[in-house]
Image (cartoon, rainbow, N blue to C red):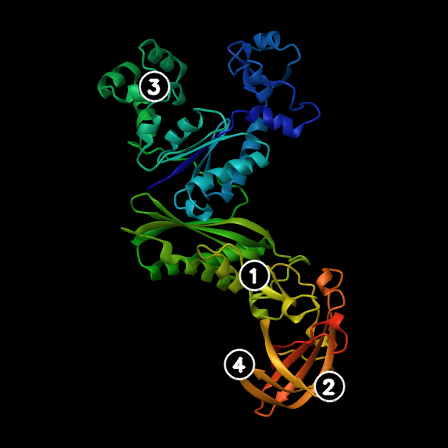
């Protein structure tokens, strides 16, 4: 089932001016935008401060000035508003590859199949409003089965979230006033005179008398809101966005056929990216089924790439998520996010052909892990400076540069297997500070054939008081049975303040 999100920004006209010219239009001063209509200037937009002062859109400019003497005014610039709304619509592509205009102060987005990417529909609506607020815009958002219903619900209140369960848009629209439908003012005035003030009251009336009295436009608006009639959106396409659309001769429904289509489109996309010196960071693959519904998958990359094999493998991993039903007749592959191919100094992810190393992971492995459902982050272990070996590693993201100690610079070898926590053992030594001669581990006695050491490590006294003066003496020992182990003693064997003198097993060579 299709799901449509609608955004309404009630203060869009004034917020645009306050964000672009904060010195001329401070937020705490009442501000209105006006335009010429019917040979007089009328208010078309108000700021929150102006709304609190009693000013509303549609009010004559002269009346607004008489109510608020210190009112700030600006004439409406339709071209600048359209350009700003275009930029915002382009920004909304992060949510779904199918945004659309709801001019002059709203946007649509076909979010079918996208909610799971953001933790569900409720979390998705919260995220949209939070990100818009971070950009300086107040908004109301609504999500339902039809774009018209979502628009009406979003415009029914300021700064609200409305989530309508599938198939429940009629009940949600029932109490709303008819003015929330995009009807001419003359039609709305006639409905008010007849006492038809709500959409529910209008929907319960016979259709034939309504059509004779008000024309087909009223029934079209009502049917689009209730889902009886489809209302296609004019999807926004950025001028510089790479997008390929292919209409198939016959509908396809098998994973192999979908993989063949991907294999035909990805090289063309990569060729266009390479020509522009850019790499893809996010791809959207849309499959339009014969019934008009859309199956969408989205994949992202850890760094900009135009590698055909890498992108094909990422998209191929998500083919099982596509439900062809009766067949797919059109496919669309879109690069919804791209960056220059030149990798900055901060990028440490290795290209696929470079293989893996001690400081990086193959980019393909990182991408496949990050694009799995439910995976939040991918981390790898990296060495870090620490006095005690069990604390000598940290978790970092693959894109971070690890500034760590090079193991080849260490004077003493380190074991291949290092325990998270040292294991207590009972050691017999000829002297308190001498080499171990034998030790007991899990009730089994091991005799030491050779020992090398000690390697003395000092505690990080600047971190905690417990580490002040703490000493560990490490020994590499080989038993008579051929085991090579790493043992250490707490303390120097002479002074009580340096440690308890207990012995521990740290690792195995």
Distance CA(mark 3)–CA(mark 1)? 55 Å
* Front-lying residue, 173 or 442: 442
Q: Nearer the viewer, mark 3 or mark 2?
A: 2
- Which of the marked residues, 2 or 4, is nearer the chain's N terminus? 2
Residue in the image at 30% along x and 46% along y: 290
Q: Nearer the viewer, mark 4 or mark 3?
A: 4
Q: Is residue 27 above or below residue 389?
A: above
Does any portion of residue 502 appear in the rendered image?
yes
Distance CA(mark 1)–CA(mark 2)? 45 Å
Q: Identify residue for label 3.
A: 198
Does any portion of residue 34 appear in the rendered image?
no
Image spot of residue 104 (x, y percent): 50, 26
Determine whether label 3 and label 2 are within 8 Å by CB.
Answer: no
- Which of the marked residues, 3 or 1, is nearer the chain's N terminus? 3
Image spot of residue 307 (x, y percent): 53, 61
Q: Identify residue for label 1.
A: 379
Q: Is residue 498 left or right of residue 238?
A: right
- Which of the marked residues, 4 or 3, is nearer the chain's N terminus? 3
- Which of the marked residues, 3 or 2, is nearer the chain's N terminus? 3
Specify the farthest residue to the front.
Answer: 496
Q: Is residue 370 above or below residue 153?
A: below
Per the rendering, the mark at residue 442 is 4
Identify the image quadrant of residue 86.
Answer: top right
Determine whether label 1 and label 2 are within 8 Å by CB.
Answer: no
Q: Identify residue for label 2.
A: 431
Distance CA(mark 3)–CA(mark 2)? 95 Å
Distance CA(mark 1)–CA(mark 4)? 35 Å
């Amino acid at each position: 089932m299709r799901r449509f999100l609608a955004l309404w920004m009630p203060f869009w006209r004034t917020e645009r001016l306050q964000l672009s010219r904060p010195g001329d239009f401070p937020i705490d001063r009442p501000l209105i935008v006006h335009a010429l209509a019917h040979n007089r200037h009328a208010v078309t937009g108000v700021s929150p401060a102006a709304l609190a002062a009693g000013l509303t859109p549609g009010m004559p400019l002269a009346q607004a000035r008489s109510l608020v003497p210190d009112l700030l005014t600006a004439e409406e610039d339709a071209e600048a508003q359209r350009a700003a709304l275009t930029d915002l619509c382009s920004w909304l592509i992060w949510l779904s590859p199918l945004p659309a205009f709801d001019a002059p102060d709203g946007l649509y987005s076909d979010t079918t199949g996208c909610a799971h990417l953001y933790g569900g529909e409720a979390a998705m609506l919260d995220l949209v409003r939070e990100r818009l607020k971070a950009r300086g815009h107040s908004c109301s958002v609504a999500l339902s089965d039809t774009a018209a219903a979502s628009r009406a619900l979003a415009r029914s209140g300021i700064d609200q979230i409305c989530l309508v369960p599938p198939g429940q848009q009629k009940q949600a629209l029932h109490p709303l006033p008819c003015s929330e439908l995009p009807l001419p003012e003359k039609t709305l005035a006639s409905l008010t005179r007849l006492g038809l003030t709500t959409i529910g009251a209008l929907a319960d009336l016979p259709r034939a008398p309504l059509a004779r009295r008000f024309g087909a436009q009223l029934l079209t608006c009502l049917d689009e809101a209730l889902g009886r009639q489809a209302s296609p959106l004019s999807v926004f396409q950025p001028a510089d966005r790479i997008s390929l659309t292919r209409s198939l001769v016959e509908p396809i429904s098998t994973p192999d056929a979908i993989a063949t289509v991907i294999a035909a489109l990805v090289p063309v996309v990569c060729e266009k990216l390479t020509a522009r010196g850019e790499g893809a960071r996010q791809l959207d693959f849309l499959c339009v089924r014969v019934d008009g519904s859309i199956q969408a998958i989205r994949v992202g990359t850890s760094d900009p790439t135009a590698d055909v094999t890498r992108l094909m493998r990422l998209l191929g991993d998500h083919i099982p998520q596509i439900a062809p039903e009766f067949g797919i007749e059109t496919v669309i592959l879109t690069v919804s996010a791209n960056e220059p191919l030149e990798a900055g100094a901060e990028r440490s992810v290795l290209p696929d052909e470079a293989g893996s190393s001690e400081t990086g992971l193959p980019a393909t492995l990182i991408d496949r892990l990050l694009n799995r459902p439910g995976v939040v982050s991918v981390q790898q272990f990296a060495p870090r400076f620490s006095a005690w070996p069990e604390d000598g590693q940290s978790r970092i993201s693959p894109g971070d540069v690890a500034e760590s100690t090079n193991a080849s610079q260490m004077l003493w070898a380190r074991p291949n297997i290092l325990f998270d926590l040292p294991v207590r053992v009972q050691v017999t030594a000829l002297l308190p500070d001498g080499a171990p001669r034998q030790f007991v581990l899990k009730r089994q006695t091991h005799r030491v054939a050779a020992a090398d050491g000690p390697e003395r490590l000092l505690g990080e006294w600047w971190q905690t008081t417990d580490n002040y003066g703490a000493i560990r003496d490490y020994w590499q020992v080989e038993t008579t049975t051929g085991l090579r182990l790493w043992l250490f003693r707490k303390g120097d064997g002479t002074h009580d303040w340096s440690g308890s003198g207990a012995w521990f097993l740290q690792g195995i060579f």
